[in-house]
Image (tube, grey):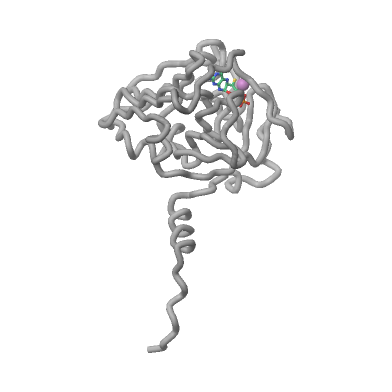
Amino acid sequence: MSDQPEPPESKLTRSKQRWAAEGKFLTGRHARPDEQRLPPGQHLTQDWPVLDLGTTPPISRERWRLDVYGAVAQPLFWDWAQFMAQPQSDFVSDIHCVTTWSRYDNRWQGVATRDLLEACQPHDQARHVVLRSYDGYTTNLALDDFAAADALIVHAWSGEPLEPEHGGPVRLVVPHLYFWKSAKWLQAVEFRDDDAPGFWEVRGYHNRGDPWQEQRYSDD
Ligand SMILES: Nc1nc2c(c(=O)[nH]1)N[C@H]1C(S)=C(S)[C@@H](COP(=O)(O)O)O[C@H]1N2
Ligand SMILES: [Mo]
């Protein structure tokens, strides 16, 4: 037997192994060649435009709550402290807005939707998710899209608290779909067996919104 020393095991190497297993820092873009990083019909922007229904609901961290209910074994009603006590993730991803701007390399921090699913335990029949926001906005997602490895319930961008105009204190980010699916000022996550199209989905926009398939508008 050689008496080679064990490779050093540190807190960092253990964390890095865990991150690999969890897909931490997943951007999704390595799955495609660089020249296909920009979806069809999109152009790149350096700034970060603000798009919403026109009102920024004044929700402080003290007043903010997240309700998780519907087809779940464990409904959750988190205040700020409970939300921040959940496992935290740090992902970098691109934004693709249906109005044709894209913005690369946004660094988000928050609770991965996979960790939320772990906590609330959706029923086997649950197939859909409806997001509800403090401005009255709603949007719907297939549970599989909500559960994407890089989908995150975000409270920080570039290491700073998420600004109110971009959905702070807390918004959703689902990088692989057009940005209207990423609800700002998130108030509730409802799990459902059946689908329930949201604000833009009943106003001519596509039910799924995959930018690489240019799913901008609904067919009917
Ligand atoms: N609550 C809420 N979330 C929302 C919207 C909204 O009007 N209300 N607009 C959506 C649309 S159409 C887009 S493009 C993005 C814009 O996010 P941003 O202002 O941070 O760029 O938010 C999405 N989430
Ligand atoms: Mo949008």
Q: Residue at x 59, y 14 (%)?
A: 55
Q: Where, quadrant-wise, is the C terminus in this rendering?
A: top right
Q: Position of residue 101 (x, y in %)?
A: 69, 28
Q: Residue at x 51, y 15 (%)?
A: 135
Along the viewing direction, whichever of 31 and 159 lies nearer the viewer: 159
Q: Residue at x 32, y 24 (%)?
A: 69
Ligand 2 is found in the corner quadrant, namely top right
Q: Residue at x 48, y 34 (%)?
A: 153
How many labels were placed on the picture?
A: 0
Along the viewing direction, whichever of 200 and 171 lies nearer the viewer: 171
Q: Is residue 137 left or right of residue 127?
A: right
Q: Where, quadrant-wise, is the N terminus in this rendering?
A: bottom left
Along the viewing direction, whichever of 218 and 193 lies nearer the viewer: 193
Q: Position of residue 212 (x, y in %)?
A: 61, 33
Q: Is residue 154 above or below residue 91?
A: above
Q: Position of residue 25 (x, y in %)?
A: 54, 48
Q: Is residue 121 left or right of residue 182?
A: left
Residue found at the far front of this picture: 62
Residue found at the far left of this picture: 73
Determine the image quadrant of residue 66.
top left
Q: Position of residue 199 (x, y in %)?
A: 51, 13
